Amino acid sequence: MDHLRPHPTEVAEKKNIDKKFELRKSEAYHYAFNPRNYCDIEFFNYNKEPTTVYAGLRYALRYAAKPIIFFTGYDVGPNDVLGAFVRHVVCSLAVHEGDRINIYFFDMRNLRDISPSMQKDMEKEFSKHAGRPVYIVNSACVDRAKCVYLQRFKGDTEFGWCIGWALLFLDYLTKHPAILRQSSNDKKKTIAHLYTDLDNRLSEKRSNHFIEAYYIRLMGL
């Protein structure tokens, strides 16, 4: 399978971070972005190392009145085909809904595929920083018996396109702040429609070119 280049990991991290900051198009959100790291919170779930959290995100989870957008990093684990240890990044939206915070994870897999306790472990960590109950809503799995794996056409020897997917979902959220006025159930319906639309675009050509072309066009490469 041919792939478009440059690959996100071939682009300087600062350029990816700068693009993340450029996409802050709506004042409806609080953007808890670390200027020195693409991820704003990093879980090292494979080796059980301590989670690192950008101070601005820690403050926002406890005190920000607006919904918060940030990027979450976590371990997928060793990949024998790639001969590499793979990490993943997810655009995340934290919203106060009732007496809890729901974090909408714009992911592309069931977290239980990595570890049965992973989602609960992450929720516990988020709750610690927020000072109230936090629950993760996996956007890839709403209204479905099976989660939508948006990276299924990337190829076994490709990794890192999650960098582009995180920017795509950030771009979507900042262009569609009306989602914030919806109830939790209606948010899930809107997100399910978005994932279905993306899934159909990928399935039409059965390739990874959709996200590759989006990323390259977005970055002006």
Image: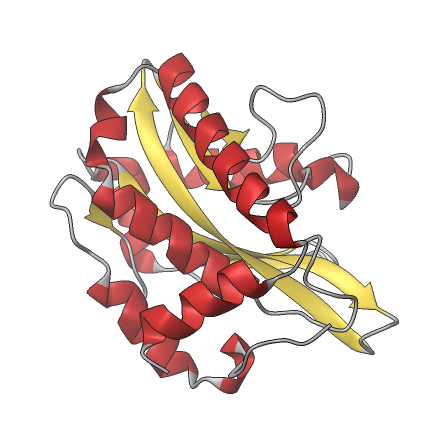
User: Is residue 210 among what the camera can see?
Assistant: yes
Residue displayed at 21% across by 66% down: 22
x and y percent of residue 134 in the render? 45, 28
Q: Nearer the viewer, residue 94 or 61?
A: 94
Q: Is residue 12 left or right of residue 159?
A: left
Q: Which of 7 and 42 is in front in this view?
A: 7
Residue displayed at 37% across by 60% down: 54
In the image, residue 2 above or below residue 77: below
The quarter in which the C terminus is drawn is bottom left
In the image, residue 48 above or below residue 97: below
The quarter in which the N terminus is drawn is bottom right
Residue displayed at 63% across by 35% down: 119
Q: Quadrant of residue 218?
A: bottom left
Q: Which of 179 and 126 is in front in this view?
A: 179
Q: In this figure, what is the number of numbered marks?
A: 0
Q: Is residue 219 left or right of residue 145?
A: left
Q: In which quarter of the image is residue 140?
A: top right
User: Is residue 47 among what the camera can see?
Assistant: no
In the image, residue 142 above or below residue 24: above
Q: In which quarter of the image is residue 78?
A: bottom right
x and y percent of residue 116 in the render? 78, 35
x and y percent of residue 213 in the render? 46, 68
Single out the residue that lies furthest toward the front.
204
Residue displayed at 51% across by 83% down: 6
Q: Which of 94 and 152 is in front in this view?
A: 152
Q: Is residue 18 left or right of residue 163?
A: left
In the image, residue 4 above or below residue 40: below
